[in-house]
């Protein structure tokens, strides 16, 4: 679906890539010809030859459509072309592409493409400036009812390339052919559901333009974090692989911590300890073998555990309970300087006073922090951002800057964002991960990677990816206990993906 580069380009960055390519001597007309050819070739490879309707818009997206129409007609496809607006209003490269189309140009109406066995959507590209309405909205509704497959050029028309949001109405494509690099809107929901199969085509833009553009958004897959991933050393031992600590809840709420602890151990942490209230000691002891136990009573007790600086990463939240006691434990742990993952109850405990948490995270003594909220927890900590209507990507970025922590905003399109502006979108999480305790294991995996010295953004991104791979490897019937047990095989195969 994509090449080894994990960069994603916003619509503005893609326009800059085009401009830089043109400045280096690649004419825009050649880029458009290459784009249209890529569409035609992808269509010819995937769909049976038959009557095809090419729907063209008034901009460069429409120009790509004119090229694809011409090349498919040259291959013997019966092509009918429809244009939104007047042909004489086309400008620049799009006008040149239209001039090379020898067939008739029909006005684009709500009935455009009736009788076709395939529709090529080249109406609007990723940089759509306003909501789709009128004849195009009516056409999109009719296409949805018709069931005719659609191949989209760049993005399905009506989809915002930056946010993945639907602007009024959007085409649902079976195939989307985009150029040079994917955009965030291809991967963020609901955009990902509308794109169908994604194909990224090389149209002659040199890859070194990325150095000048310096994109800050990435696909979450191994090339993003390969350089930081911990590799076991032949002379290493358990103490060189970090000592992770997971804080347990009370006697009736211990399972989440144990799930997280096993995730940390399977992710490679050398030692894992469950810090347990005295009331939960026997329950935890009855279930744990390779994972150690350390009883503690309140924030002072947790501080004492963390005085051993070999204990270098801590997770608090799963099953911890919501309230003052959890708040005090979090604030005490932040003063210890250990790397931290805050999840679930640790986040909700600060719902009334999120600023207290953010000030502590940014404090002099605090180590790196990863927050792993789902949308509900995110809304409790960042109510203004949650209500802003902004894209998931932008909300996660703003939250990371506000909190001074890496944010893992969970979901089918999990976004990982760092305070420095970097962000990644995860694409390998399947529906089988929607099961009780799955998020606890994710927190533990990230914890295990932090314990081994991975920086927080890379640890969070790698943890989310490993979690998704584990779910996919197990498949239907997955329960949270299965996730850590899938990690050894994934980690064994990882070097091949890390290159």
Image (spheres, grey):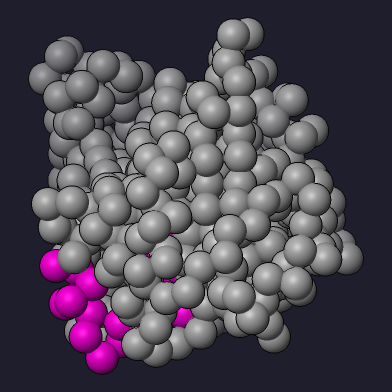
Q: How many marks?
A: 0
In the depicted view, which residue is nearer to us: 283 or 440?
283
Q: Decide if residue 338 is on the left or right side of residue 430.
A: left
- In the rendered image, residue 348 lying in the magenta stretch gets the answer yes
Q: Give coordinates of residue 407: x percent, y percent.
A: 35, 59
Residue 52, compared with residue 43, is above or below; it is below
Q: At 15% across and 24% down in the image, what residue appears?
A: 212
Q: At 80% across and 50% down in the image, what residue appears?
A: 289
Q: Decide if residue 350 is on the left or right side of residue 404.
A: right
Q: At 52% across and 46% down in the image, what residue appears?
A: 244
In the depicted view, which residue is nearer to us: 199 or 355?
355
Q: Give coordinates of residue 205: x percent, y percent.
A: 30, 22
In the depicted view, which residue is nearer to us: 109 or 288?
288
- In the rendered image, residue 349 lying in the magenta stretch gets the answer yes
Image quarter where the C terminus lies is top right
Can I make out residue 279 in this image?
yes
Image quarter where the N terminus lies is top right
Residue 420, compared with residue 19, is above or below; it is below
Q: State the image quarter where residue 481 is shown.
A: bottom right
Farthest residue to the top: give it: 234
Q: Give coordinates of residue 478: x percent, y percent.
A: 83, 62
Farthest residue to the right: give it: 477
Stretch of the chain drawn in magenta? 341-359
Q: State the image quarter where residue 53 is shown.
A: bottom right
Residue 226, compared with residue 460, is above or below; it is above
Can I make out residue 185 in this image?
no
Q: At 26% across and 91% down in the image, what residue appears?
A: 352
Q: Give coordinates of residue 251: x percent, y percent.
A: 68, 82
């Amino acid at each position: 679906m994509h090449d080894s580069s994990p960069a994603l380009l916003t619509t503005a960055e893609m326009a800059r890539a085009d401009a830089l390519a043109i400045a280096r001597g690649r004419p825009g007309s050649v880029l458009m010809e290459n784009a249209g050819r890529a569409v035609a070739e992808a269509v010819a490879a995937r769909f049976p030859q038959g009557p095809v309707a090419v729907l063209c818009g008034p901009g460069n997206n429409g120009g790509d459509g004119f090229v694809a129409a011409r090349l498919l007609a040259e291959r013997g496809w019966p092509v009918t072309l429809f244009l939104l607006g007047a042909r004489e209003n086309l400008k620049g490269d799009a006008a040149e592409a239209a001039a090379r189309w020898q067939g008739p140009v029909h006005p684009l109406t709500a009935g455009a493409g009736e009788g076709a066995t395939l529709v090529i959507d080249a109406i609007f590209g990723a940089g759509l400036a306003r909501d789709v309405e009128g004849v195009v909205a009516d056409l999109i509704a009719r296409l949805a009812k018709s069931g005719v497959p659609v191949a989209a050029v760049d993005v399905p028309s009506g989809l915002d390339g930056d946010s993945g949001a639907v602007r009024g109405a959007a085409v649902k494509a079976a195939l989307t052919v985009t150029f040079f690099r994917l955009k965030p809107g291809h991967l963020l929901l609901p955009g990902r559901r509308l794109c169908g199969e994604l194909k990224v085509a090389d149209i002659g833009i040199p890859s070194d333009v990325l150095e000048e553009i310096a994109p800050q958004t990435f696909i979450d897959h191994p090339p993003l974090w390969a350089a930081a991933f911990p590799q076991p050393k032949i002379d290493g031992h358990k103490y060189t692989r970090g000592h992770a600590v997971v804080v347990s809840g009370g006697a009736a709420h211990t399972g989440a911590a144990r799930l997280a602890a096993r995730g940390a151990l399977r992710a490679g942490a050398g030692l894992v300890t469950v810090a347990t209230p005295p009331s939960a000691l026997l329950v935890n002891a009855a279930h744990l073998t390779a994972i150690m136990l350390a009883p503690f009573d309140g924030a002072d007790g947790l501080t004492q555990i963390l005085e051993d600086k070999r204990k270098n990463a801590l997770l608090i939240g799963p099953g911890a309970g919501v309230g003052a006691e959890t708040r005090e434990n979090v604030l005490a742990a932040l003063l210890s300087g250990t790397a931290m993952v805050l999840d679930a109850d640790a986040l909700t405990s600060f719902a009334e006073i999120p600023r207290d948490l953010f000030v502590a995270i940014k404090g002099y003594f605090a180590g790196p922090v990863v927050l792993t909220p789902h949308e509900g927890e995110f809304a409790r900590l960042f109510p203004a951002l949650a209500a802003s209507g902004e894209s998931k990507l932008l909300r996660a970025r703003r939250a990371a800057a506000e909190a001074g922590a890496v944010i893992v905003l969970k979901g089918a399109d999990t976004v990982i964002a760092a305070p420095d502006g970097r962000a990644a979108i995860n694409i390998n999480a399947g529906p089988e991960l929607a099961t009780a305790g799955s998020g606890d294991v994710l927190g533990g995996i990230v914890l295990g990677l932090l314990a081994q010295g991975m920086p927080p953004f890379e640890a969070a991104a790698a943890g989310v990816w490993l979690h998704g791979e584990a779910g996919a490897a197990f498949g239907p019937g997955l329960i949270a206990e299965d996730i850590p047990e899938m990690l050894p095989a994934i980690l064994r195969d990882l070097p091949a993906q890390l290159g």
